[in-house]
Amino acid sequence: MLPLVLDSVSFVVNGKALIDRISTEIGEGPRTVILGPNGAGKSVLMRLCHGLLAPTSGSIAWRGAANGRRRQAMVFQRPVMLRRSALANVAYGLKLAGFTPRECGLRAHDVLDAVGLAPVAGRPARVLSGGEQQKLALARAWALGPEVLFLDEPTANLDPGATREVESIIGQIHAGGTKIVMTTHNLGQARRLGDEILFLGQGQLVERAPIGQFFQQPASAEAAAFIKGELPWH
Amino acid sequence: MNEILLAVTEAGRMIARLDGALSEIVLLSLRVSLTAVILASAIGLPLGAAVGVGRFPGRQALIVALNALMGLPPVVVGLLVYLMLSRAGPLGQFGILFTPSAMVIAQTILIVPIVAALSRQVIEDAWQEYREQLRSLGASQLTSALTLLWDTRISLVTIILAGFGRAAAEVGAVMIVGGNIDGVTRVMTTAIALETSKGDLPLALGLGIILISLVLALNAGAYWVKEAAQRRYG
């Protein structure tokens, strides 16, 4: 269903453009990182792409074959766990995606195995640690076999150990052929996980570049300032 | 003072020997109020979930109305149900005035707003947290409402018990539509009112003690269930 084509997309709330006339295309392959300071509109852009928000003007369309509700998934900054077991949380998403009960069970077990949560499959999801919950959220999305996975600051609330594990799972998901689109304001993570950067500032797409070029020779003053300002802490 | 002591002693004896008249009254009370709370939950929980999750014209007015109706005066409900069920009323042909069925109807009307208004609040709060995740997984409004009903089950139990408490403790509605007929429609509250006015304090007190103990035991049970569930499911 890729590429996802954005044509002059705006999202305006109370006269303020949170996303301001963005036109771009997100295609198969490279891991796309949406980078930018807080308030740049990263999360809003991601929600527009995923379909949780509708643009107030402009259009967003999947141009490739097959139509897509189920073939895309999203993981949020703060995982939302249903009040049931870890396994049942994964199975819930699968059931909504139309898998048979038997497939739900099999796939849920497999994916929990893959993210290392098999030992806690039967435990209530809400009593798991923050890192385990985020891994479970990744598993729930991964189990659907999405063509595109949107990740909104997936490690913002995690400690370094859990962050490493989550990043490694994201790598596995990408290796399995899923297109990764993620937001972050963490330059280190952008370097580790990104192939190309979409740099946002104040709702506008300031710059789009391959990762190496972006960090070595940012084309815009904003990106240069962001990299310079952020680097000492990362 | 002496009279009160005597009455308490006699009440204790009646409870201890499971006095026939006393247990008949208690059992009818339980039958009527439990049936009413089951019916009210069957109506009020889906209603609360629909209003909590749905967005439709008149929603705010409905919320205000439900909240206001929580304070319905039982005698007024009794009067309205009486008018509906009396010979000349629109439902007079069923001939259920002065039967336990009439009492169940009155109490159901009385507690539907309690169950609906309180569950609406609980479910809407949970909806704020779950909305994006459920929509991302492709859940319809109906599926979301059912998911939230299940996920807030611990809080809903407390609400249902509040409804039961209200039903079991009210006297105005059942007095009017039941008629307080000995052996047919006499429940704890109407019996207490009658025996007090007749001067049979031991029976009135015995019933009062049972009524309070019942409500206390129920609430203790609910509290315990809620605590245990919260520890287990988070």
Image: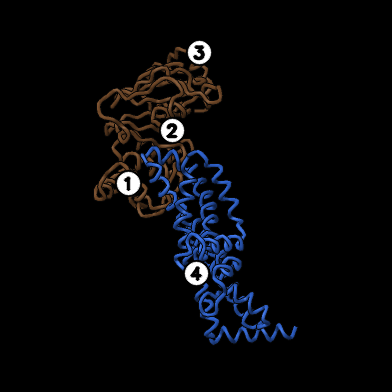
Q: Looking at numbered disc 4 in the image, what kind of residue is underneath it?
A: Val
Pointer 2 with pointer 3, Cβ within 8 A: no
Q: Which chain carries label 1?
A: A
Mark 2 and mark 3 on one chain: yes
Q: Mark 4 — on which chain does it sit? A: B
Mark 2 or 1, closer to the camera: 2
Residue placed under numbered mark 2 in the picture: A152
Say left or right for B184 vs B169.
left
Identified by mark 2, the residue type is Asp
Q: Position of residue A84 (x, y in %)?
A: 40, 52
First in sequence, mark 1 or 3: give its number. Answer: 1
Q: Name the residue under label 3.
A: A221
Query: Residue lying furthest right in this view?
Result: B1
Give yes or no for contact between labels 1 and 4 (Cβ–Cβ under 8 Å). no
Picture disc at residue A112: 1
Display colour for chain B:
blue
Does any portion of residue A60 appear in the rendered image?
yes
Q: How far apart are marks 2 and 3 (CA)?
A: 25 Å
- Whether the residues at callouts 2 and 4 have beta carbons within 8 Å, the answer is no
Mark sitting earlier along the chain (2/3):
2
Chain letter for brown, please.
A
Q: In this view, does A144 lie above or below A51?
A: below
